[in-house]
Image: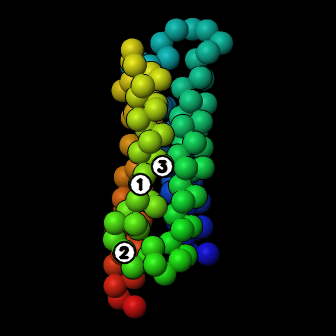
Amino acid sequence: MKYFKIIVLCFLMASVLSLIGVFVLQSAGLIGQADSDFRSLPYGIALGINLFLFLGSFTILLNLQESIRVNNLYRALSFFLLPAIIVLFLLLAMWDQPWPGVLFCVPYLLLLVIFFVRSGKHHRAI
């Protein structure tokens, strides 16, 4: 249950941070300047990217097995391998302007790093 909470909390917190970031960028006039029907599209893109990272983070549940949880390499791979591949594919898909898409990934990955470090400290304390 602890690892499932990590996945859900990471998704919720990263989504809120990404939506706040989109709001700030639109308020500053850096994105979504055109007055069209697609003005709210960055909000959907931010949520969609976080949803893909959320689905890619289900490999964290592999830490329920003792053999993966005690090995730091396997534990790191279970946390970061699939989200890193998703970010790489996102970079390749948005090759002409990749940075807005990558900026939507940063909150999720930072929160994932925080939860990874905290889960490692918790495991060593036991």
Q: Position of residue 4 (x, y in %)?
A: 59, 67
Of mark 2 and mark 3, the one earlier in the sequence is 2
Look at 34% across and 66% down and name the residue there: 73
Q: Residues within 10 Å of mark 1 (few under 14, many from 20)?
A: many
Q: Position of residue 56 (x, y in %)?
A: 55, 50
- Three-letter amino acid code of the residue under disc 1: Phe
Gap between marks 1 and 3 measured at Cα: 6 Å
Looking at the picture, tell me which residue is in the foreground, 9 or 123.
123
Identify whether 20 is placed above or below 26.
below
Looking at the picture, tell me which residue is in the foreground, 10 or 72.
72
Check residue 71 in the rendering and tell me which mark sits there, or answer none: 2
Q: Residues within 10 Å of mark 2 (few under 14, many from 20)?
A: few
Residue 16 visible in this rendered orientation of the protein = no
Check residue 82 in the rendering and tell me which mark sits there, or answer none: 3
Look at 55% across and 76% down and name the residue there: 64
Look at 47% across and 23% down and name the residue there: 93
Looking at the picture, tell me which residue is in the foreground, 26 or 65.
65
Quadrant (top left/top right/bottom left/bottom right) for the C terminus? bottom left
Quadrant (top left/top right/bottom left/bottom right) for the N terminus? bottom right
Q: Secondary structure at mark 3?
A: helix
Q: Which residue is mark 1?
A: 80
- Three-letter amino acid code of the residue under disc 3: Leu
Answer whether labels 1 and 3 touch (C-beta < 8 Å).
Answer: yes
Identify whether 74 is placed above or below 57.
below
